[in-house]
């Protein structure tokens, strides 16, 4: 919890970030004005009833970053053990960035653009929505012994989120043929981009290095599970 901000050897960290960094999308969180006024136990405070299409009481907007900005993500561990909870399914990862390029705030989300993970999900026909919003390639769609062909039977509609804070559109399967009967289940295997959130637990005031001109942000991120929350 003591390493949220800065090393005095910021020049060395800058070289590390440039050499080992990866590209990310950052989604800046802003508290939803509608849900701030709702009881958390009230169904209308959740995304289904929110006029802004928020997620967990936050409106997310894609942060525009320069093309050459990278960050270091390390200790990506999906099997974190917590004494009070046991094995946490979402896990954690560490973040290092040069603050002049990009920093995270509480509840901001991060998508790792160069990594991929395989997921398998049971989907109901007529709903056809995938749990993970950043699906980018379908591997298999099947129902029992029947396998469906992408481009002939169905197509993947990727999830979308812009930088204007508009409601998020989840990834989904669009059927080009009749496919499975309505309300029947089918299986989808697909590739997704890992998604993480910063919950603000280890944020500390910024301190400059000895030269006074470079800040390094070090944070612990939580790996989000499949669900959209």
Image (cartoon, rainbow, N blue to C red):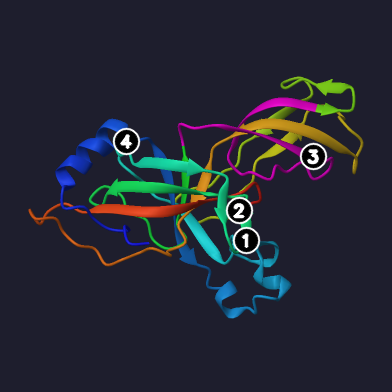
Sequence-wise, the earlier of marks 4 and 1 is 4
User: Mark 1 — residue?
Assistant: 85
The reply, left or right, for residue 105 in relation to residue 213 is right
- Residue at mark 4 to residue at mark 3: CA–CA distance: 36 Å
Dot 2: element: strand
Q: Earlier in the sequence, mark 4 or mark 3?
A: 4
Q: Secondary structure at mark 1?
A: loop
- Residue at image location 21% in from the left, 54% down from the top: 215
First to last magenta residue range: 113-141
The percent coordinates of residue 120 (x first, y second) are: 72, 35
Outermost left residue = 211
Please state which of the two labelled residues, at mark 1 or mark 3, is closer to the viewer.
Answer: 1
In this rendering, would 59 be left or right of 4? right
Position of residue 109 in the picture relative to residue 216 (left or right):
right
Mark number, residue 67: 4
Residue for point 23% across, 55% down: 6
Find out whether the residues at labels 2 and 1 contact each other: C-beta distance under 8 Å: yes
Q: CA distance from mark 1 to mark 3?
A: 27 Å
View extreme (front): residue: 83
Q: Which residue is mark 2?
A: 88
The answer to whether residue 121 is magenta is yes
Residue 114, percent across and down? 45, 31
1 and 3 marks in contact (CB < 8 Å): no
């Amino acid at each position: 919890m003591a390493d949220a901000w800065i090393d005095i050897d910021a020049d060395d960290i800058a070289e590390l970030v440039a050499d080992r960094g990866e590209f990310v999308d950052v989604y800046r969180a802003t508290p939803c004005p509608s849900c701030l006024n709702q009881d958390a136990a009230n169904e209308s405070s959740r995304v289904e009833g929110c006029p802004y299409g928020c997620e967990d009481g936050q409106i997310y907007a894609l942060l525009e970053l320069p093309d050459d900005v990278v960050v270091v993500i390390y200790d990506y561990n999906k099997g974190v053990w917590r004494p009070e909870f046991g094995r946490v399914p979402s896990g954690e990862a560490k973040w290092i960035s040069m603050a002049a390029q990009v920093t995270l705030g509480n509840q901001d989300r991060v998508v790792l653009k160069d990594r991929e993970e395989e997921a398998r999900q049971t989907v109901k026909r007529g709903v056809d929505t995938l749990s993970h919003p950043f699906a980018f390639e379908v591997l298999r769609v099947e129902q029992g012994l029947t396998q469906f062909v992408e481009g002939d039977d169905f197509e993947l509609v990727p999830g979308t989120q812009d930088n204007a804070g508009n409601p998020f559109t989840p990834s989904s399967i669009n059927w080009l043929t009749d496919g499975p009967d309505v309300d029947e289940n089918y299986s989808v295997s697909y590739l997704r981009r890992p998604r993480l959130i910063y919950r603000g637990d280890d944020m500390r005031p910024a301190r400059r290095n000895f030269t006074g001109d470079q800040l390094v942000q070090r944070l612990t991120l939580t790996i989000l599970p499949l669900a959209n929350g």
